[in-house]
Image (cartoon, rainbow, N blue to C red):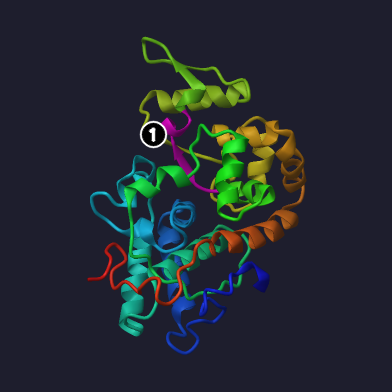
Amino acid sequence: ILGLFPCSNLGFELEFYALSCPGVEFVVRDVVRSASSSDPSIPGKLLRLLFHDCFVYGCDASVLVEGDGTERADPANKSLGGFEVIEAAKRELELFCPQTVSCADILALAARDAVVMAGGPDIQMPTGRRDGLVSAISNVRPNIVDTSFTVDDMIRIFGAKGLTLNDLVILSGAHTIGLAHCNAFSDRFQVSSKGNLTFVDSSLDKDYAGKLAKKCAASTSATVNIDPKTAFSFDNQYYNNLIAKKGLLQTDSILFNDPRTKNLVLQLASDLNGFYEGWSTSFLKLSSIGVKGDGEGEVRQICSRING
């Protein structure tokens, strides 16, 4: 595992806060547990937040910064949620160990804990990330996956982050929890002049498409569970959905249709432990992308704004 972490990030290690803030993991987990018990959609939101953070400029909490021209101003980030959970953990940690724990670490730990709350595997995770000094809307588009992407497009984006084809398929399993807005998959339907939806994408099961059309006819801002069967459980049902032609987003469906990824989808669909093992390795890689060390970042006092 140690080989996954770049040596240049001195201080990025297990138990980084052992002396400076020993309770950090308990505090974050407690806040995530409490938020998740009152809103079961929280784990999916926290996981998505980490993806959107790490893929743009590395895991440095730049997605948490508010304001015009920041990453949050990009339309792709308008539907992100879970910010209040990170802020709540930050406020508590500032009481116990002021100016010590970075927002980037809180976000990474919260996403890890989100998976645990949804019944997924627990992972020992290095900490010591610094918060980034830049959050720019212009960094978002070139770095994140769009729902219209091909497998080649996704391989390119993941590859640029040091992630493999296997990581791509395994990390897509994050869609076993979470919600999507209708406009994220509306290109798979045709809208008649009367506003009725008919599906045009043959890689989608007809009955499933019919249910989606009904749900989305009322409003394109409506949300649906990405996994229609076990929406709030972190399991391998996502891969079984792909086999059953019930991959909600086009970027889900194509993983079963492409010969390069199909076999791994089949494998993960029938092997929950294999998925959990793969997830643990791939998630550690994801949460270590572009980590800022000492001198490259700061510890923010409030996660939504850069110090100064």
Q: Quadrant of the C terminus?
A: bottom left
Q: Does the magenta stretch include residue 187?
A: no
> Residue at 45% of width from left, 26% of height from top?
186
Residue 206 placement, left or right of 80: right
**Residue 250 in view, yes or no:** yes
Q: Does the magenta stretch include residue 184?
A: yes
What number of labels is visible? Answer: 1
**Residue closer to the observer: 206 or 203:** 203
**Residue closer to the observer: 211 or 124:** 124
Q: Give the range drawn in magenta.
A: 177-185
**Residue closer to the observer: 303 or 193:** 303
Task: Provide residue 59's location: percent of width, then percent of height.
Answer: 46, 62
Q: In which quarter of the image is residue 205?
A: top right
Q: Is 296 above or below relative to 36?
A: below
> Residue at 53% of width from left, 22% of height from top?
210
Q: Is 175 above or below relative to 258?
A: below
Residue 72 placement, left or right of 255: left
Q: In which quarter of the image is residue 195?
A: top left
Q: In which quarter of the image is residue 83?
A: bottom left
Task: Provide residue 65's location: percent of width, then percent of height.
Answer: 31, 59
Local crowd at mark 1 within 10 Å, few (<14), some, or many (≥20)? some
**Residue closer to the observer: 198 or 56:** 56
Task: Provide residue 105's location: percent of width, then percent of height.
Answer: 45, 70
> Residue at 77% of width from left, 40% of height from top?
263
Residue 142 placement, left or right of 221: right
Q: In which quarter of the image is the N terminus?
A: bottom right
**Residue 1 in view, yes or no:** no
Q: Read off the residue under disc 1.
A: 222
Which kind of residue does numbered mark 1 sit on?
Ala
